[in-house]
Image (tube, rainbow, N blue to C red):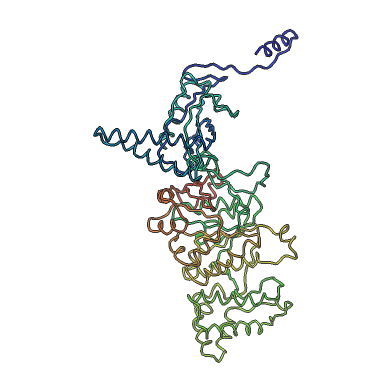
Amino acid sequence: MKLNAYKRKAAGAAGEQMPSPAALSVTPWHVKVGDGYSATFAVTGYPAEVGPAWLDPLLSYPGRVDVAMHVTPVPAQTAAPMLRKQRARLESTRRLDADQGRLGDPSTDAAAADAADLAERVARGAAKLFDTGIYVTVHGRDLDELAAVTAGVKSAAASVLLDLSPATFRHHQGWVATLPVGVDPLRMRRILDTTALAAAFPLASADLAAPAPGLVVPPEGVLYGVNTTSPGVLIWNRWAQDNHNSVVLARSGAGKSYFVKLEVLRSLYQGVDVAVIDPEDEYTVLAEHVGGTVVQLGQPGVRINPLDVPDDQRADTLTRRGLYLHTLIAVMLGAAPPPTERAALDRAITSTYAKAGITSDPGTWSRPAPLLRDLAATLRADTDPAAAQLAARLAPWTSGNFSSLFDGPTTTRPEGHLVVWSLRHLPDQLRTVGTLLALDSIWSGIDTPQPDSSARSQGRRRRLVVVDEAWLLMRDGEGARFLFRMAKAARKRSAGLCVITQDAADVLSTDLGLAVVANAATQVLMRQSTQSIDAVAEAFNLTGGESRMLLSASRGEGLLVAGRSRVPFRSLASGSEHKLAVTGIGETN
């Protein structure tokens, strides 16, 4: 202090202005630091048992609150006599009550049992003791705000059975105890064991973990919304996960399409190419706004030829096209045909391509592809009765009511940063087939070989494939297998598959449905029905609180499940984004 006074005096003589610290005014009930007020409280009462993140109500309080924890290990040679004395004190209290005929105190009995258990664990080296002090400093711009924040902090502490005692006449020491200087003038301590201390330190948070210090993370995340249990926001990067797939499970009207449309729009901002399977024409407005392409399957003149050979120079391209036709026809028929019909179909596929001049020579693949009716004609010309039977079963798709989608060459080959395949105009009997046709067209553009690994890592654009109402395809065994293969292979091609469905119980009740969910590193759960919550809770290992939250979640609210991260959030959109994402009258986020 004398040195500082000498410096100020010398500076004044020289006509200079030296900076001085803000004034600190101390009262018995608070301290005034600069223009603000602070009051410190010590945690003096603890619950009998604590769970993970038991300090979170104080750490995530929406106000300026400083929480400091001072921890000092208790040496083993000191811990054992300390526990012995505590056990003797509790046991003598119990015996004195028994000798005098008084009923035993349940809190004393519980404390004695806990002390005996802790002494045993300390003796075996399974636990250690720590001298711990936890202090909370509350700040306010004026005394009224300080009183309001203090009341809220006390209420948050009481919710987890923590008792706060004010540092009356010692608020100056309490203020110092919560500064980042490692000094504890208050010395209001409590002995905690390893388990209780580990549940509070490192300090837990409801937000995603921040990057390690010094690690520069590229800004590739997408804003999902705001965290409903903390003041933070939820920004998620699917491209940094083990795989790029995601699954969104929610009941009808929970806001799943709203949430996915926001992710699609924000992915476009980052240069990601997006393709959407849209059963209800919900993404058309978004596509028109960003200059995307909309393919209206089912409209007059819009046709898809499933026998088109992809623009791919790999030697097995024609073979893979034949395998896809097996899958497509199984979906058309509602089940895989019997072995004799499959054998006839395989012969007919090869023969139909040969009649069109298309062989295993890649130079012939640019010739006009045959049509589905040509395949049916080849089956009818086959002498095998199974081929004639299969041709008869395909008649509705080649010459009947379902043939309008296949009765000519492909009319469109959509390209662009956003392609929406609308199924709104298809009859219900054609929607599953339409979904498979659209996915095949999308996958043919993704599954293109690169010349070398460097080109794969540097030149391949990221692509996101969104399959809305995926239950249309997953209710069919062959369609579910196609979706599963796509989910498995997407990561190696810098692509991600986003599966959206409202029939969670049906998807989770099948092995292929569970496999698709398991191959999604990003899983988003929104409001669930009471009929499906048990299956969802079992599949995602939800706690009771998480299950109740999903049953009562408002529209647009959900739970991000990614590994050990469980983050509840609410979708957040700007005014212009909201107009593009709303699909129904009166719908909000």
What residue is rendered at 57% in x and 62% in y?
A: 421
Residue 177, quarter of picture = top right
Front in this rendered view, residue 449 or 167: 167
The relative height of residue 565 versus residue 99 in the rendered view (above or below) is: below
Residue 181, quarter of picture = top right
Front in this rendered view, residue 4 or 225: 4
The relative height of residue 98 versus residue 272 in the rendered view (above or below) is: above
Front in this rendered view, residue 337 or 41: 41
Relative image position of residue 420 (x, y in whole percent)? 58, 60
Q: Quadrant of the N terminus?
A: top right
> Does 151 sit left or right of 212 as displayed?
left
Relative image position of residue 107 (x, y in whole percent)? 34, 37
Relative image position of residue 233 (x, y in whole percent)? 55, 42
The relative height of residue 568 versus residue 368 in the rendered view (above or below) is: above
Q: Residue furthest top?
A: 13
> Does 15 sit left or right of 136 as displayed?
right
What residue is rendered at 50% in x and 86% in y?
A: 389
Front in this rendered view, residue 307 or 203: 203
Residue 576, quarter of picture = top right
Relative image position of residue 18 (x, y in whole percent)? 70, 15
Q: Residue furthest bottom?
A: 383
Circle count: 0
